[in-house]
Amino acid sequence: MKELFSEIRSAVFAILVLAIVCCVLYPLVIFGISQALFHDKANGSLILDKDGAVRGSRLLAQGFTGEKYFHPRPSAAGNGYDAANSGGSNLGPTSQKLNDSIKNRVDAYRKKNGLNADESVPADAVTASGSGLDPHISVHNAELQTARVAKARGLTAEKVRELIQRYTNARDLGVLGDPGVNVLELNLALDSPGAQP
C-alpha cells in the first residue's frame, strides 16, 4: 500500500510541476517576449486615431462600399468581413454558383470603375481570400479604382497614387509574394485632413 501511495504522490507532484511549467511559466515567458519584441503585432496591430480610438487592425479587412473609398476584396466571412466567422466560401472551381458570382462581380467592378466591357479585372477584385479578411488588394486593383476615388473626393489622380504608394507593403523578405495595398490604412489616410483638397 505504501508503494501505491508513493506512486500516487509522485504522479500528483509531476502533474503539479508540469501544470506550473506549461500553464504558468511558459505562457508568461512567451507573453513577455512578444510584448518586448513584437508589441504592436502581439496586440493586434491596431490602428488608432488621434484621440486614441481604435479604427481597426492592419491585419483585418473592413467593408467599404462608398464611391470615395477603395474597396477591399470580397468576403465570404459570415455576413462579410466578420472576424468571428473567418473562412472562405468552400466553393470549388466547378461550382456554377462560384462562376456566376465571379461573373456578376466582374460586371459590377467594371461598371463601378468605368472600365470597358473587355478590360481585364484583377482576380483579387472578384474572389474572396481563404480567410475572407485579407486586408490587402493588389497594386493593379488599386490603380483601377484610382479614377473613381479621385473623382468622388475632388482629388487629382496623382495625389491618390501617392497615397497608394505610401500604403503599399513590399514583398516579404524582398522576394516572397506580391506587393499589396492595405485598404483600411489607405482609406483612413484619404479621410485625414491632409488629403482633402
Image: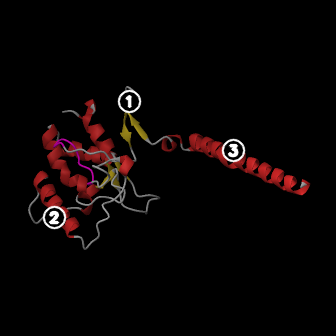
Q: How far apart are marks 2 and 1 (CA)?
A: 39 Å
Please tell me which residue is depicted at 20% across the width and 70% down the height of the picture. Answer: 96
Which corner quadrant holds the N terminus? bottom right
Residue occupying the far front of the picture: 1
Under circle 3, the secondary element is helix
- Residue 64, quarter of the rendered image: top left
Identity of the amino acid at label 1?
Ala
For this view, does 73 lie left or right of residue 169?
left
Under circle 1, the secondary element is loop
Q: Distance between the residues labelled 3 and 1?
A: 33 Å
Give, as a single range, the part of the protein colored magenta.
66-74
- From the viewer's side, name the closer residue of 78 and 102: 78
Q: Which of marks 2 and 1 is nearer the N terminus?
A: 1
Q: Which of marks 2 and 3 is nearer the N terminus?
A: 3
Identity of the amino acid at label 3?
Leu
Residue 114 in sight here:
no
Q: Are marks 2 and 3 in contact (CB under 8 Å)?
A: no
Q: Is 143 placed above or below 154 here?
A: below
Residue occupying the far right of the picture: 2
Q: Residue 103 carries which label?
A: 2
Identity of the amino acid at label 2?
Lys
Q: What's the magenta bit mostly, secondary-structure-wise?
A: loop
For this view, does 2 lie left or right of residue 90?
right
Residue 21 in sight here:
yes
Q: Earlier in the sequence, mark 3 or mark 1?
A: 3
Q: Mark 1 points at which residue?
A: 53
